[in-house]
Amino acid sequence: MSENSVDFSQVRAQFPILKVVENGQPLVYLDSGATSQKPLRVIEALDTYYRQENANVHRGVYGLSERATEKYEGARETVKQFLNAKSTKEIVFVRGTTEAINLVAHSWVSENLTEGDEVIVTEMEHHSNIVPWQLLRDKLGIRLTVLRMNQKGEVCLNALKGLVSEKTKFVSVTHMSNALGTINPVKEMVEIAHSVGAKIMIDGAQATPHMTVDVQDLDCDFYALSGHKMYGPTGIGVLYAKEDLLEVMPPYQGGGDMIYSVTFDKTEYNVLPYKFEAGTPHISGAIGLAAAMDFLNEVGLDNIAQHEAGLLAYATEQLSQIEGLRIIGEADKKGGVVSFVIEGVHPHDMATLMDQDGIAVRASHHCAMPVMQHFNIPATIRASFGVYNNFEDIDRLITSINEAKEMLV
Ligand SMILES: *Cc1c(COP(=O)(O)O)cnc(C)c1O
């Protein structure tokens, strides 16, 4: 692997929380897949906003409100560039990936699908990309079809080609699996969906902190992301959608800001993207998300991908040497996530002991119970990496596992 031009110890130093002492030990944070920590510039963006710029947006004619609006709309421009969308009209601020998926389910999909039509998801989806489609299935009588994965945790493009038909109206797939780390060939999946005239949504919650995403290159119809998974605040996320689709979609929620005019007889909706942003938005969240995107751009997503690939390779090699340990998810293309089980040890017991060593890993089904069912296990221990992790974190992870194993087996 070639030298990385970025000094990642300097990147790590920008995260104040990593100086926290946990159970007498410096914190080793290996749960970025659940939520990431925040760099100083994100914390400072929120602080500055509330100290100096707070006002409601799109309303006041006074200077403070105009400045808040400028910041909020500036954040939308940052997101547009980050995803390489064509226009800021295609960028809708929502609470997170979950809300983005629900918006599309309740607007485009419930408007365009009728009984007998089909939605396809993969077997590795997060619950937030399963349950909204089940709710619609029960309401509309549509079919929900699952693209299965192999024992490595990969889906097969030929299987998808075999699955789609003229009944397939919508496909919704994760860009990167939070439970397994698998990176899906989404560009090819977009082509397959489009070949039968279906629209496709990509769940980018795990992808956006780790790799460059270009929605025009992917040609996806919808793309969802969560701020908190990519070094930004909680409670803010983005739905990207092609303008022509947003234009014909009915609003998801009604209220202030999403209207142009209201009488009791008739409401005219506001222009894009405001038609989909009812009520006072999460202004500070959007500003914090833009700061997180600036941070990612500055470090460089290619540098980040390279750094995390190094961590993943090292962790995989070290973990593989532990007797009785089985890695779950061995896709050829993987992001910085390693899930594993240890023979004779319950993941929760292991993670509880590891917490005593200051190591934060997740032991659960990772909101992807069908993945656990596929591998016939109740849960895994998952270490997921971010920009701030280093080889020492992995050494401490391995030591902790070995010590915990002594006590548990
Ligand atoms: C976290 C996650 C979600 C849900 O994101 P929220 O921020 O909780 O709305 C959806 N899909 C994947 C792959 C995730 O990792």
Image (cartoon, rainbow, N blue to C red):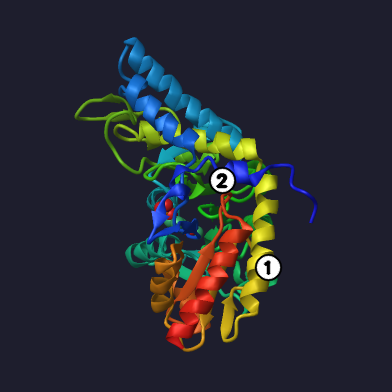
In the image, 357 versus 31, the foreground residue is: 357
Q: Is residue 198 left or right of residue 47?
A: right
Q: Give above or below for 10 relative to 126.
A: above
Residue linked to disc 1:
157
Q: Earlier in the sequence, mark 2 or mark 1?
A: 2
**Farthest top residue in view:** 62
Mark 2 secondary-structure assignment? helix
Residue 227 spot, x, y in % from top left: 46, 44
The local crowd at label 1, few if under 14, some if 14 to 19, many if 20 or more residues have their Cα within 10 Å, is: some
Locate residue 189: give its quadrant: bottom right
Q: Is residue 145 left or right of residue 233?
A: right
Q: Give above or below for 336 relative to 75.
A: below
In the image, 144 versus 366, the foreground residue is: 366
The CA distance from mark 2 to mark 1 is: 38 Å
**What residue is at 80 percent from the left and 52 percent from the top?**
2
Residue 40 spot, x, y in % from top left: 48, 36
**What residue is at 34 percent from the left and 67 percent from the top?**
138
**Farthest right residue in view:** 2
CB contact under 8 Å: marks 2 and 1: no
Q: Is residue 51 left or right of residue 229?
A: left
Residue 152 visible in the snapshot:
no
In the image, 2 versus 123, the foreground residue is: 2
Query: The residue under label 1 is which amino acid type?
Result: Leu
Residue linked to disc 2:
12
Query: The residue under label 2 is which amino acid type?
Result: Arg
